[in-house]
Image (cartoon, rainbow, N blue to C red):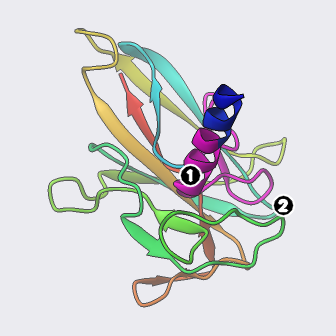
Amino acid sequence: MHLRIAALAFLLATTATAQTTGVVGINDYTVSGLGSGSTSCSPLCFPNGGVTLNLAVSAPAGSFAIVVFNFCPCTPCSLPAPANACLPAIPPTACGASNQSLDMNLTAACGIAFSAFVGPNSAGTLSLALPIPSITGPPCLNFTISTQAAVINPCGLGVPGLVPGPFVLTQGYTLNF
């Protein structure tokens, strides 16, 4: 009985501290098929690179996305954005009264290293192939990048005062090689 109560408390605590959550059909960002429905800053490991990452965003028909990258780990709640009214609903974050946030470190040392405009493929998914060269050294400790996408979508408010909508943010990831 105590184990069940502890497990439930852990699950509720984990849910309460979630960052931007991917919702299929609105803002769900996956990396080589991993991470669907996850929350921001989930780390993914691709030992020593030598792989082509297949970046995909599940978004409404007719959408486009901008995928951004930098060379620092994902940073939860770096810039909370106002809650939007997308349907299906994006769950709330732990970043205040919001259901999305920019979860990338935007300090001068990190910034936005590069970005890519992504359009729909024949299956209607916004996708991009990103080749990563082989990297020597200890697996998943050699090189880190973070990534997040903004989906151009009329239900999104963007980040008023900085970058107005219409866009919604996806979950972000820390990618280790």
In screen coordinates, is 87 left or right of 130?
Answer: right
Residue under the image location 56 percent in, 46 percent down: 14
Q: Is residue 127 among what the camera can see?
A: no
Q: Are marks 2 and 1 in contact (CB under 8 Å)?
A: no
The image's mark for residue 61 is: 2
Q: Secondary structure at mark 1?
A: loop
Left/right placement of residue 128 relative to residue 125 reads left
Residue 89, percent from left and from top: 78, 67
Instruction: Report the quarter where the C terminus lies.
Output: top left
Gap between marks 2 and 1 measured at Cα: 19 Å
Mark 1 belongs to which amino acid?
A: Gln
Q: Which mark is residue 160?
A: none
As drawn, 62 above or below 44 = below
Res. 72 visible in picture: yes
x and y percentages locating residue 3 in the rendered image = 65, 26
Quarter location, residue 170: bottom right
Residue furthest left as drawn: 109
Q: Position of residue 154 (x, y in %)?
A: 73, 79
Callout 1: few (<14), some (14-19), or many (20+) C-alpha neighbours within 10 Å? many
Residue extending farthest to the front is: 1
Quick one: label 2 or label 1, which is nearer the N terminus? 2
What amino acid is at disc 2?
A: Ala
Q: What is the secondary structure assignment of the residue under circle 2? A: loop
**Which quadrant of the structure image shows residue 128?**
top right
Prevalent SS, magenta region? loop
Residue plotted at (27% across, 27% down):
143
Instruction: Name the residue at 68% across, 57% down.
Output: 27
Magenta stretch: give its range: 9-38
Mark 1 sits on what residue? 171
Q: Position of residue 94 (x, y in %)?
A: 51, 63
Q: Nearer the viewer, residue 159 or 15?
A: 15
Quarter of the picture holding the N terminus = top right
